[in-house]
Every structure is written in C-alpha cells, then in structure tokens.
Amino acid sequence: MLETSKTSSDATSLQDAPDLLLAVKDLEAWYGESHVLHGIDLEVRRGQVVTLIGRNGAGKSTALKSMMGVLEKRAGSVQFGGVETITAPARDIAKLGMGFCPEDRAIFASLTVRENLFLPPVVRPGGMDIDTIYQLFPNLRERMNSWGGQLSGGEQQMLAIARILRTGATLLLLDEPTEGLAPVIIQQIAHTIELLKERGMTILMVEQNLHFVSRIADRHYVLEDGNIVDVLSGTDVEANHTRLQNYLGL
Amino acid sequence: MIDFFATFPSMPALMGQLTVGLVNGAFYAMLSLGLAIIFGLLKIINFAHGAQYMLGAIVTYVLLNQLGIGYWPSLIIVPVVVAAFAILLERTILRRIYRIDHIYSLLLTFGIALIIEGVTRNYFGSAGLPYYAPESLSGGVNLGFMFLPIYRAWVIVASLLVCFGTWYAIERTRLGVYLRAATENPSMVDAFGINVPRLISLTYGFSVGLAALAGVMAAPIYQVNPNMGSTQIIIVFAVVVVGGMGSIRGAIFCGFLLGLTEGLTKVFYPQASSTIIFVIMAIVLLFRPAGLFGRKDEEETSQTEVAEESYSFLANPYVTLALIACALAAPFLFYPLFLVKVLCFALFASAVNLLLGYGGLLSFGHAAYFGGSAYITAHSVKVLGLDPVSGIIAGTLVAALLGLFIGWLAIRRQGIYFAMVTLAFAQMIYFLAVQAPFTGGEDGIQAVPRGALFGVIDLNSNLAIYYFVLGIILLGTLLVYRTIHSPFGNVLTGIRENEKRMRSLGYNVARYKLLAFVLSAALAGLAGSTKSIAFQLASLTDVHWAMSGEAILMVIVGGVGTILGPFVGAFVVSGIEHYLAGVGSWLSVIQGMVFVVCVLVFRRGILGEASRLVYALKRHRAKTVSRLSSVNFEQASGKTEN
C-alpha cells in the first residue's frame, strides 16, 4: 500500500485560490417539500481528496446529488472550475468535467459491461485510456461481454468508477464506494483511490469507513441534519478519532 | 363442429390470405414497435399512435392531390413532416406529464387522438379516399401456386427491413446504447452529459415517424380515411399485450405472427377473424400475464389525483335534500329526455369512477357492459316481450357476468396495461355485436317498447320515464355510496394507494379487485339497460370505444373519486353534445381539447376542486372560530374522504 497523505492545507483562507476547483456556498436542497440541506459551504482544491462524513440521513448523498445537478430543487451557489452551476442541468455540469458515481452505482442492467464502460461521452481530453483501466481493474476485462446486471457488487463499483475515469472528468464525486463490499474489495477500491490521487485526480467522496478515509483524505466535512458542523484536516483524524466517532454515533 | 377437410381452401386462396395476413402483420409490427420504444423511454402509452398513422396516410393523399408529389418522395417526406409535428407535441404538451401517473398520459394522448381525428374528419369526411400504388409496384406475378400482388410483397419486405433496421439501431449502435440506458435510468444518463430531453424528443419523433411511414405504405391498400387509425390502434394494443410491453423483438415478432394468424383464421373460420387476436390475448393473459417476450412488470401503484383534504357535500343532509329536490323539479326546467340522458351517463360514469377513483383501475372498455346490456335489454323487451324492469335486470345480470369473465382476465395486469387489456376486450365485444344476428348490425335494435312499470304505470310519457330513470339511478348511486363507505370500499382504497402493502396485510387483492370490477360492470350495465328502455334504442354507438372514452371524460371533468363528480361531468359533457350538436365533427375536437386541458391543469375535476375549496374555507373559518372560542376545529369541520 502506498502511503501518500500529502500535508493538507488549512480549511480556511481558500478564497480566490487559483487551484480552487469546487466552491460551494450556502447550498440548500429539497426532496419535494422536505428541506434536506440547510445551506452548506465547502471547498475542494485541485488534487485534493475531500470527504463528507456524517450519520445516515445527514444529507451527504443529497449534497453530492445537488452539486451534480441530479437533484434539481436546489439553491445557493456551486462554482465548479469558476463556473456557476446552480441552475445548470446535470448534463451541462457533466460536460464541465464533473463525474458522478452514485451510491447505487447505477450500472445499467440491460447494457453489457462494454456498453456501460463506453456509455459516458468523453468530456475533456486526458481521460484514462482503456489499457490503464484494464490494469487498474483486471476483473472488468474478463467480463466485458457480460450484462451489467450480472456483475457482483465489487465489480459494479469498479465499473462505475472506471466509466467516469474514461471521460476525462476533473472531479469525481464518489458516494460510499466501499459500502456493502467485502474487505478484500475495499482494499482494492482504496488502492485505486490512492492511485488516482497520486495521478492528481480531485475527489469529493462520501464515506462512512473512517479507517479507509483517514488514510487518504486531505480534509473532512462533518454533516449533521443538513448542516456542516465541523471541518477536520486529514492529519487531525487520528488525533480526533473520538470526536469523529461521536459524530458518527459509533 | 367445423369439418376442416371439407372446408379446406384451395392453395391460391390460402396463400392469398396468408399474404394479406402478413401485410396486416407488417403494419401491426411497425406500429407496436413504435409504441414499445415510446413506452420504454417516455413511459407513456401513446394513444395518438393510431391517429398519427392515419395522419401519415392523409398527408400522403394530400401531397399527391394538392402538390402532385407522388408515392416515392412521400415515403421520406411524410414521416419527416409527421415526426416534426410529433416533436412539437412532445415539447409543448407531453413533456408536462412525465412525472405524474401513467394513466394520465393515456388520457392525454387519447384526447390528442380525438383532436387529430376530428380535424381530419372535418376536412376529409369519413368516406375512404382512393390512393393508387405507383406504376412500378402495381400488378402482380403468378408464382404458380399463387398470384402475388407486387405492392403487397413490397410492403412486407419494406416493413421487415424497417423493423430490422430499427432493431439493429437500438441493439448495436451508440445511439441505441443511449436509448437503452435512458430507458433504464434517465437521470444518470443525463448526469453523464447526454441531453436526455432531446433524446426523448427525437425518440418520440422517430417512433411516430415509423407510424407515419406505415400510414404511407397503407394508403394504397386500405382506403385513406380519418377512422383508419383508431381501429388499428386497439388491435395494436392487443399485439403489445401479447408481445410484452418493453420488448422490441416481441413487438416485431408478435406483430407479424398475429397478422398471419388473423389471415389464417379468415381462411378456416372467417367469423372469428376480427376477434381472434383478442382471444389470443386472453389466452396469453391466462398463462403468461407479462406477455410472450415480456419480463414480469414492476408493480405500479396508482397516483390518480383525488382531492384528499376535501369537503363531502353529501355528508351535509341539507345539501343532499336540496339535490333531491332539484332532481325532482328538474324536468320542469330542462327537456326531460336530455335529463334522462344525463342521468344514464352519470350512472355509467359512476361505474367507471368506482373503479378509477376508489380502486385506482382505469377501465377503458366499459362501453362493453353499457352497450352489451343495452342490447340484451332491448332484445328481451322487444323480441321476448319482457316487462321493462325484468329487461333491465336481465341486462344488468349479463353485464355482471361479462364483467366477471373480462375482469378475471384483466386484473392480471395493472395500471396502464389494465387499461389496454380492458379496451381490447371491449373491442372484441364490439366486433361480436357487429356480427351477432340479434343486434341488427348498423341499424341496432330500434323502437324498443317502453312498456308499463309493473304493468300499471305507463312509461311512454317523457315525465314518467324521467322519474322511472331517476329512481333507478338513485338506487344505483346509493349502492355506490354504500360500497365506498363500507369496509370493502376502504380495502379498495388501500389497494389503490399501495397494493403491495395490502397484500402483505393478508388481503386477497385479486378478489377485491374482481368484485369491484363486477360491481362496476353491473352498474354500467344497469345504466345501459335503462338507457335502451328510455331511448328505445340499442346501437353500435353504445358499444363503441368512443363511449368508454366519453364515460372517462365525464369522470375526469366532474372529479375522480367523488360521488357527485360523475353527475356534474355527465351534465357538462352531455350539455356540450346537446347544445353544440350543430358543430358536427368538431365535437370530437372539443372533447379532445377538454381531455387535454383536464389532464394538464385540472386533474381533480370540477367537484374535486370545489370540495377542496369548501374544505379550505371551512377550515379557515373553523380556525378563526377556534381561536375565539377554543373549539376544536376537527369537530367543527368533518374531515371525510369524499
């Protein structure tokens, strides 16, 4: 395993930094009538891995969905690469280079693995080529002609990550990539994310697995009832383990 | 029994019918293919598909006769023109209803079909317009064992190519991958940067273009006329149920197969040729409810918009008494026979409403019970000499039996499929009515004697018949009221809202649905029987699919899930017909527009909106009062489900 935890920068004073990739201010979101996000602020710099942590129902997935534009009822400000996207449809946000890997992985059961992999159009140059993807996920190569619905949970997760790596997206939104997977698969996913980080990929990730998160993330935002209640830098995690456990109610 | 060998046809006759069958099958396949693609991506049943097919034929005719553009260019121009029209329709109207219950999409596109057909009928009349195949495709070749008309061969080959091409595009091309992915999870495809709304528009346009292409190819074979689409679409619905809704291969295969079967039936047992497809549908429903190629469909729970926080007018005894007083005095203000019509339709609509508003089941085939029992009553009174009451009871019983049989098959499917299945069975009853010897064909059964009630009260005066009908309709409505407010009615409402949960609570959902269906069919039958006595007529209009549509229109206009709604709806819709009788074929355009407007902006109907308003007012007043005298407002304004 590669231990590459870069020293993280302070969570504050990121304003107008040239390497600021995602700046979220006062983001609110609704599911129908119910108000789920109550104005969250967060920032992600290029090359960073940032996580959202919090209990079930805190609004972590909702936050990702409203940044991606999949959840349309939202307000506030989401600046991605300097472009305001709060009113943009998901397809336009995707074209700016945001790649989304949802909690349910959204593998298309009626498409083959190959079709799934090549489904998202390339949005920018510099995406991962297919050989590198095969190197990263050797399992996928053997299953290229299977139906998406026939994959195991781990394979589905790999495919879901692989297909957005191909597109040249500059920011990956990963929603609980290790949820429900066997420990050996979690290792593989963790390894992949570390590798991606090494290659300079920016990642915003929802994750409950603290052990996994503390190794690679530069910064953690703690969500509670649709508000950000705490920000920890990556190195703080070990020191603040009890505090974090408290947030997660463990 | 038929002796097959004695009636075995000659080889040329057999092959000739097989060719005709394949040609019909070609059209079924192209139409059901388009329906399947649209349903997959848009999740709507495009009732306007038949009208759009007809539009293809009409535009072909117009191009030749007005602009001198012939068959070959039409094959390209017409689909493009009709597809452009379809895309406009999708962008302006259909797009608004994707997020609401699928049933509404059926109603909306039904309204659009009425408008298209009404407009074309107005300009081109109902008579068939001749269109001749181009020189290069006319004539035929003698193959020795049969004479093969070249045009028919061309239609079969061309449609096979089109179907295969479409299948290939969906299964093997990048655009096809987008389409399949968006069918499964549109928002995720959108999140990959693919413009899903545009994909939807293009898909709708393409599928309607297929229908228009079928229309061009049909122009030289069938007579071009504004009604050619509606009969076709109902058969195509049956094809789709047999094939399995989501399946592209199923649509193509079953289209050709059923066309062929129809052709074969014409050879061996011609009387059954118009109903054979529906019989096959019944058998498939019995053994493979999801269709031959279909996967088991997801459970659909209905979300028809019923005003939940509403005021029950009938809960107020003064209102009820005032209504009855109005009903008693009405014949002195309005023409009694008009009121009789309103009452009969109100009961008919109540029957539809019982299923839709309380059971969440949209029956698109209630004309079968309404018209079927009208025939039975008319026949038994006129020919068998029964008195009116016995005649009505006989008609109602037959409707209940018919409902038992069709309901037993139809409840195997849910939601939008249920609507298609009931519509298809009703069409089968329609064809039977056309063929049966006692129904009098186009003339119907006329001059049915009204007779005397219990042998004493002569019903021949308009006033007498009005009070007679009023009595029956009040009884019927009372039955509806008691049903809804019984434990049975509550279970039904539970099934409407969440069928799975009711099943998990141990209710035999199928039995409840069937009982509701039989009850509803019997009520529709009661309405039809009464109508045939009051108007001394039973005719094909009563069993026609348009009659089913009219009943649904009344329910929607009046207010789904309200007891008085059907009465209001019947009054409004019959009133439009009565007072706008002069506008001729524009009437169906107006009806279509009412459908479209109701579905788009007015889904609770007149009474639904009114009772919500009264409820809100009462609640507001109760709040003010309770603030003054601290009276619990829950007691002040009874919150009821009607």
Image: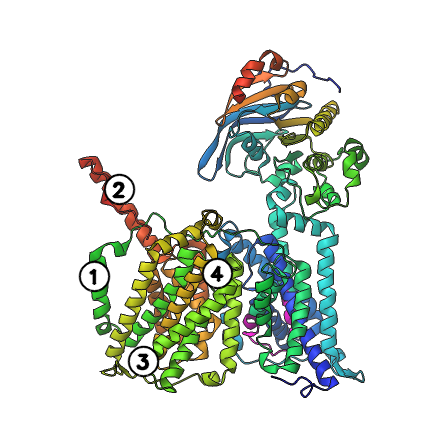
Residue B27: give x, y in percent of width and height: 65, 70
Secondary element at tag 2: helix
Pointer 3 chain: B
Instruction: Please name which of the two marks, 4 or 2, marks the residue nearer to the observer.
Output: 2
Residue that badge 2 annotates: B634
Asked if marks 3 and 2 touch (Cβ < 8 Å), the reply is no
**Residues indicated by labels 1 and 4 sit on the same polypeptide chain:** yes
Q: What separation in Å lies between label 2 and label 1 (alpha carbons)? A: 25 Å
Q: Amino acid at mark 1?
A: Leu
Residue that badge 3 annotates: B388
Secondary element at tag 3: helix
Mark 2 vs mark 1: which is more N-terminal? 1
Asked if marks 4 and 3 touch (Cβ < 8 Å), the reply is no
Residue that badge 4 annotates: B107
Mark 1 vs mark 4: which is more N-terminal? 4
Residue B83 placement: quadrant: bottom right
Q: Which residues are magenta?
A: B211-231
